[in-house]
Image (cartoon, grey):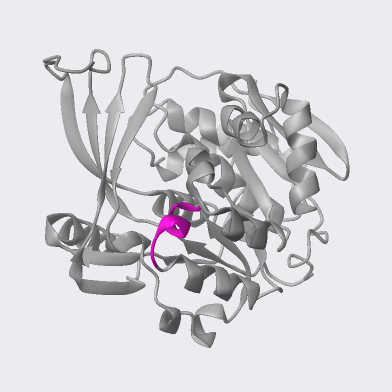
């Protein structure tokens, strides 16, 4: 039976989402790349020859995937993703133009990167990423025009590994009014401890999967990891648990929300869809445990299709049309 999500009264959430007016704009910082999706019978070992099953190109990247969910949810947002040159930059620029998505900034002398997504028959994916212009941010881009109407910002964390990381962290520190949604993924261990400490001091809402959370904290149980991460950030922490569902620590208590049944096509973009849905749900006044329920449904829909992008119809079906323009 389909789950019917009730539209709540808009309520204060965090330090930024406090207005009784329309939801504020979400700034979505991070990458837009070409996903080169390669289906393989198994991951190759050293010196092995493997005949692939298929391959194709699609628009992807953490920031783009999150922005796509916000677009489906009718939530005001701006995709803040630099675009480079080269064959991948041309693909990204052309794809964004075809989708009527404004290009945030262009770096015509730096090649855009890409992500090689190796997908096994189980649907599990392994990423080989080539970073390029999409992760390089310039201080002069952070203008009042960009900030106008914004109440929150999403960062995936990969951009914090690059040479321009200091400018981005300084920008975040200069905007204490913005609620940060931070989803660094497995690369959390590659970000400098200084940058992590400074970002955690800004009380972000942290989003990781169970392996990442336990690995980063060095804990054996998810419960321990949630409390340790909450202690570091002083804010809610969300941890996805694959098909089992997801957990969070909210108002000092741990909540577990079971997952939705899905036939797995591939798992590309499932985490991005999860955090994107949570951002949208919180902006509409949902409490975090209920937001996890909706996010689990959207993630299940994403893994049921090839690639990271849901159609409008699939998103509406997964959320029972909860996110409509009339609800904003």
- Magenta span contains residue 76: no
Q: Is residue 17 left or right of residue 69?
A: right
Q: Residue at x 42, y 28 (%)?
A: 267
Work out whether 277 lies above or below 132. above
Closest to the observer, 13 or 1: 13
Q: Position of residue 132 (x, y in %)?
A: 27, 58
Q: Looking at the figure, which quarter contains the C terminus?
A: bottom right
Closest to the observer, 219 or 69: 219
Q: Residue at x 80, y 37 (%)?
A: 227
Q: Position of residue 219 (x, y in %)?
A: 70, 27
Span shown in magenta? 157-163
Q: Residue at x 54, y 86 (%)?
A: 144
Q: Is residue 119 left or right of residue 213?
A: left
Residue 328 visible here: no
Q: Position of residue 296 (x, y in %)?
A: 61, 32
Q: Looking at the figure, which quarter contains the N terminus?
A: top right
Locate residue 204: give its quadrant.
Answer: bottom right
Residue 157 visible here: yes
- Magenta span contains residue 161: yes
Q: Residue at x 28, y 65 (%)?
A: 83
Locate residue 124: give its quadrant.
Answer: top left
Closest to the observer, 12 or 320: 12
Q: Is residue 249 left or right of residue 150?
A: right
Q: Position of residue 224 (x, y in %)?
A: 78, 29
Work out whether 293 lies above or below 89. above
Q: Total of numbered circles in the picture? A: 0
């Amino acid at each position: 039976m389909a789950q019917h999500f009730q539209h709540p009264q808009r309520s204060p959430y965090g330090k930024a989402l406090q207005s009784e007016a329309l939801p504020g704009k979400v700034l979505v910082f991070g990458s837009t790349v070409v996903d080169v999706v390669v289906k393989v019978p198994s991951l190759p070992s050293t010196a092995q020859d493997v005949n692939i099953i298929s391959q194709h190109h699609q628009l992807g990247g953490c920031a783009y995937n999150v922005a796509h969910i916000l677009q489906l949810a009718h939530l005001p947002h701006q995709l803040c993703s630099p675009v480079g040159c080269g064959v991948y930059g041309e693909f990204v620029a052309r794809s964004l133009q075809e989708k009527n998505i404004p290009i945030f900034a262009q770096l015509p002398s730096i090649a855009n990167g890409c992500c090689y997504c190796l997908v096994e028959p189980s649907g599990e994916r392994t990423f080989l990423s080539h970073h390029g212009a999409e992760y390089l941010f310039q201080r002069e881009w952070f203008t009042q025009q960009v900030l106008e109407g914004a109440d929150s910002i999403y960062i995936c964390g990969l951009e914090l590994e690059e040479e321009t990381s200091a400018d981005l962290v300084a920008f975040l520190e200069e905007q204490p009014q913005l609620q940060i949604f931070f989803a660094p993924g497995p690369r959390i261990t590659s970000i400098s401890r200084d940058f992590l400490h400074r970002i955690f001091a800004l009380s972000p809402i942290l989003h990781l999967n169970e392996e990442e959370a336990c690995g980063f904290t060095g804990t054996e149980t998810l419960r321990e990891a949630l409390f340790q991460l909450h202690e570091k950030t002083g804010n809610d922490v969300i941890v996805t648990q694959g098909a089992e569902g997801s957990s969070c620590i909210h108002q000092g208590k741990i909540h577990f929300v079971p997952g939705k049944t899905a036939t797995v096509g591939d798992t590309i973009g499932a985490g991005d869809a999860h955090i994107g849905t949570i951002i949208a749900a919180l902006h509409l006044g949902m409490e975090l445990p209920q937001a996890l329920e909706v996010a689990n449904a959207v993630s299940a829909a994403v893994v049921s299709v090839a690639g990271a992008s849901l159609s409008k119809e699939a998103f509406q079906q997964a959320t029972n049309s909860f996110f409509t323009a009339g609800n904003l």
